[in-house]
Image (cartoon, rainbow, N blue to C red):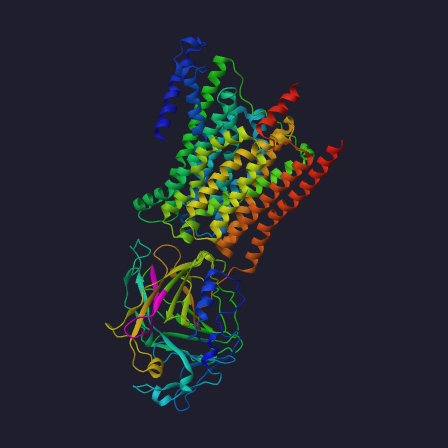
Amino acid sequence: MCGCALRCWGWGPWAPGPTLFLGLLLSAAPFGLHGEETRQVSLEVIPDWEGPPQNLLHIRAVGTNSTLHYVWSSLGPPAVVLVATNSPYSTLSVNWSRLLSPEPDGGLTVLPEDSVQFSSALVFTRLLEFDSTNVSDPAADPPGKPYPPYSLADFSWNNITNSLDPVSLSSTFQGHLVNDPTRAFANGSLSFRVQAFSRSGRPAQPPRLLHTADTCQLEVVLVGVLPRGNRSLFGLEVATLGQGPDCPSMQQQHSIDDEYAPAVFQLDQLLWGSLPSGFVQWRPVAYSQKQGGRESALPCHASPLHPTLEYPLPQSPIVRAFFGSQNFCAFNLTFGASTGPGYWDQHYLSWSMLLGVGSPPVDALSPLVLGIMAVALGAPGLMLLGGGLVLLLRHKQYSEYQSIN
Amino acid sequence: MEEEDEEARALLPGGSNEAGRGTPAAPRALPALCDPSHLAHRLVVLLLMCFLGFGSYFCYDNPAALQTQVKRDMQVNTTKFMLLYAWYSWPNVVLCFLGGFLIDRVFGIRWGTIIFSCFVCIGQVVFALGGIFNAFWLMEFGRFVFGIGGESLAVAQNTYAVSWFKGKELNLVFGLQLSMARIGSTVNMNLMGWLYAKIEGSLGSAGHTTLGVTLMIGGITCILSLICALALAYLDQRAERILHKEQGKTGEVIKLTDVKDFSLPLWLIFIICVCYYVAVFPFIGLGKVFFAEKFGFSSQAASAINSVVYVISAPMSPIFGLLVDKTGKNIIWVLCAVATTLVSHVMLAFTMWNPWIAMCLLGISYSLLACALWPMVAFVVPEHQLGTAYGFMQSIQNLGLAIISIIAGLILDTRGYLFLEVFFIACVSLSLLSVVLLYLVNRAQGGNLNYSARQREEMKLSHTE
């Protein structure tokens, strides 16, 4: 089984670039996981026959010899468990009574257990809010005076069955604060739109992250929520599994290519272990308008990952159910700066990220750019060459005539 | 700047005393500084001429220096922001033909200069008011008025130079004027951001009012230029009285019907010119934020690097002018300049190398091109059509700048900087293609464009013989 691990991740329609070659080199490593061009993707809301409906979304992406399982749930704070297996027949098994109990360990398993190659989890624990007035430094951390955060475990979520779209392979968790004395969420909500893909491509909406069949996209949208200050910045606290005493690494890649997200030359990545294992990838940009354009782009700042031993994080039953008791690392994402566009413009904020296994997708120059460059550099060169030859030949003829005379 | 201001004022009362006497004093009785035939006096005039253009060059690139602030405070996207440059260029599509005519036949050089300076001043004030009243259309209108004055003022400035320095230090004067223009642009790039921050500090907050006040203060340079125009007018009239010299004329004769007689090499020169400049000026207009966003430069560092083209151009223009004069071979120089620009844009687009390298290359090639390209027109056009040819060249250059400014903003908003750079590369490449074509056509027709200086000398001799 492991022999075929030599096959490459990241075969895609990308033109070669130095990063891609590096990616290929790394992905050819024998400990790798399988990348697949296309996958059979199915979305299923797993029902609990004995109780009230629960939001447990299972995305199963089957390839020729591997299966990816994404389990999204809003039991507790919104969370996702990501499992990669090397069998096209692996399945998810849910023990509801155990999952809903105070000790959910073992409530979620992927069978056969020895097919599991990689697994990890993300938990979106809290919605942060900062008062950015009187903050002059845009890169300050924290970006202002913090308000008490909203714990996402205290949110009530819609029934995702209604938003399940088998065509676009997406579903949306929409939630609002249950105990809301200030009525901040009276006309507002925080939603997590989850989308899986059966093949590689790129959405039309910025930041237009390149996705493959091995990835899953999450779009977080905050809309209509009353901010507690005139210039409130929002943020999101994200927790993930630690690796022993260490935290996974955060990478910031610089690229020359901003064609798909104008003026954003950076790509942030969270990597679990050495490549290729699993990753979270996002562009450090959020948008304050629905049709995210450059004028509504907000910088998105990610703090380094830190262990969360000092303070209690809201616990996610599904993560506990799959992994048992683990230590967590967390990081904060903050959207916007005290100057420039912000949430205050339209009470709207959207941010996207990609979650997947294997090597993260690598952007390459678009065919249009390559085409224009080829013509732009080739035409004058050819012209010079061709014209030079013609002139040389004519000159030769001319001098021959002269010599006869 | 204040020193110059004082100097201009100091000259005025001295002059009015002279005029008060009513009788033309004997030239010998005048001190050197007040004697129009004396070098010292001409130097004063030269100083005034240089500062005559300072205001318009300073204010031309105000939007580039304050790009972030303009876009944030006026809440416009890059496409709309670039309209500020387009509106400057639109009137000049027509005025390039008319400027000379207006100066020669309608206003005369003195009134012409004053009127164009007034346009520049009023334009800048309206531009600033647009900021204060938070009306972007008013800002655009201000840039339009500013544009009416701006280019024509440059023509007037040159006419003054010819009238005072012909047969003396003319080339040096032209060079100095150009250097002064570049210094104006450089000072603007590095000063306006700082000025904005100061005013933001004193007003308490950023916003359209801060922007408007900053621009209004920038407008002081235009007032200074207007004062220079008035002083020049006075001194010029005085010189006319004392030396009985004629009022300066551009001597431009524009006959639009000449266009049909333009030869293929001339059209190629036009294409080279347009395609080259549209890849330089709109780029500088957008450059500051590019350096900040792609290379992570601070605002001040981004301003500095964005002005480096002008900084290099100031001392290099006279040097390259001399070089091209001494060697000839204009097409080869143009080819080198365009190819270097291509390389520099490719570096900016596809590498993360320190942009100082690319910008210095751009500065050098830009200066070289200006020195090698513009004189070529004179080699392919009979002298009586020269005015029309230059007018036409400037006109389509402005047309190109107006259109490409808008397109550049549009591309940046939708496709990002890489694509914008690729677009500029395509423009420079078209320019390069035209240079190659020009070289071939010139070779095939046995033209004189690529003669060395010695060949030119020989040609001249054989003609006179």
Quadrant location of the N terminus of chain B? Answer: top left
**Apparent side of residue A178 relative to residue B179 in the rendered image (left or right):** left
Quadrant location of the C terminus of chain B? Answer: top right
Q: Nearer the viewer, residue A313 or A2?
A: A2
Measuring from the top left, give residue B101's x and y in whole percent: 59, 28
Q: Nearer the viewer, residue B400 or A253?
A: A253
Measuring from the top left, give residue B178's x and y in whole percent: 47, 32
Measuring from the top left, give residue A312's x and y in whole percent: 26, 75
Would you say residue B132 is visible in this rendering?
A: no
Residue B338 falls inside the magenta stretch: no
Write the start and end of the magenta stretch as one range.
A231-250
Measuring from the top left, give residue B395's x and y in whole percent: 58, 37
Would you say residue A256 is visible in this rendering?
A: yes
Residue A248 falls inside the magenta stretch: yes
Q: Residue furthest right?
A: A405
* Residue at position x 55%, y 45% in the image: B428
**Apparent side of residue A376 relative to residue B48 in the rendered image (left or right):** right
Q: Nearer the viewer, residue B362 or B204?
A: B362
Number of numbered markers: 0
A72 shown above or below B171: below
* Magenta span: chief secondary structure: strand
* Residue at position x 55%, y 36% in the image: B333
Occupied quadrant, residue A152: bottom left
* Residue at position x 54%, y 51% in the image: B423
Q: Residue furthest bottom?
A: A50
Q: Residue furthest left?
A: A310
B225 shown above or below A327: above
